[in-house]
Image (cartoon, helix red, strand yellow):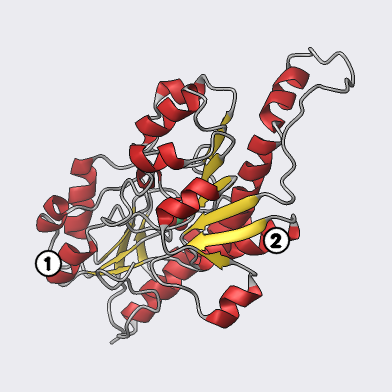
Amino acid sequence: MPAPRLSVVLTRRLPEVVETRMKELFDVELREGDQPMTREELAAAMRRADVLVPCVTDQIDANLLAQAGERLKLVANYGAGIDHIDVATARMRGVLVSNTPGVVTEDTADMTMALILAVTRRIPEGLAVMQAGKWEGWAPTAFMGGRVGGRRLGILGMGRIGQAVARRARAFGMQVHYHNRRRLRPEIEAEHEATYWESLDQMVSRMDVISVNCPHTPSTYHLLNARRLKLLKPSAVIVNTSRGEVIDENALTRGLRAGEIAGAGLDVFEHGHEINPRLRELPNVVLLPHMGSATVEGRVEMGEKVIINIKTFADGHRPPDLVVPGVM
Ligand SMILES: O=CC(=O)O
């Protein structure tokens, strides 16, 4: 007799091709609307599923895991970041967690570069003038931004995405610097022509652009706190396509308002989609709705990764993208 199909509950709508493939393979429960589940709905889903497929908008904390049913065996996250999942508690309760690394790398690095260009070249200001029908023609001193070529880029977190940003930045003529928990192997560092800074304080104080590309973990929470933000040159720009919690958003907002920081490009925020309203008022800030990995190709590949993780688990093996507590 074939083994019963796994019951898989999706907390959000996924691209259609992903949902269709999942329906062929598993006993899938799709979400009807595209609103995130409430906590009650999440708790109920975790009681009836063998596998839960959440994403960044779902907080899978110890409290919810304590309410999970006996049958919940795998949380197959749709996304690379797993800071919304209490992986250690899950593991203690015998629930595995997997994610979708790798497939978000290039798209997120593209978005990082787009933000660097948007802020330094004042693209949103130009767009606003055009959309308002207020352009009065070319002028020698209008919309002067800064040239990215020759600027020093400090990458905070030189993992897969940080290195993909480095490749792009060099193609734009930027000088690449980085800070990482561990220094890269010499041949990788040479490949990126990157300068390593052991001291984050020193790197922050010398860069023209800082790009946040490290995951959010207890040790990176507010890594760019009020004290470090004060070290930035007043001409410096910060971009963040990783997680908002790495920057103290209120301190950043104060610094931008006071002219102590020249600009920011933010795709992620400290409190999900609750954004410090003052950020929206600033002309030197480009805000995006967490769309770093949002390409059709990327979102389908993320779904394919989720499917491979579930299928491998269903076949009795360790999911290839198993998240090990404490390793991210
Ligand atoms: O933010 C997106 C992800 O974690 O994949």
Whole-percent x and y of residue 70? 12, 67
Q: Quadrant of the C terminus?
A: bottom left
Q: How many C-alpha atoms fall within 10 Å of the one at disc 1: few (<14), some, or many (≥20)?
A: some
Which residue is pictured at 35% across the width and 40% down the height?
Answer: 227
Whole-percent x and y of residue 40? 18, 42
Q: Is residue 195 above or below residue 248?
A: below
Pick the front one: 321 or 210: 210
Which residue is pictured at 49% across the width and 75% down the height?
Answer: 184
Q: Which residue is mark 1?
A: 70
Pick the front one: 139 or 50: 139
Where residue 194 is drawn, which disc sits there?
Answer: none
Q: Secondary structure at mark 1?
A: loop
Which residue is pictured at 13% across the width and 70% down the height?
Answer: 92
- Amino acid type, residue under disc 1 in the picture: Glu
Q: Quadrant of residue 100?
A: bottom left
What separation in Å lies between label 1 and label 2 (alpha carbons)? 51 Å
The answer to whether 246 appears left or right of 87 in the picture is right
Q: Which residue is mark 2?
A: 170
Where does ligand 1 appear, by image quarter?
Answer: bottom left
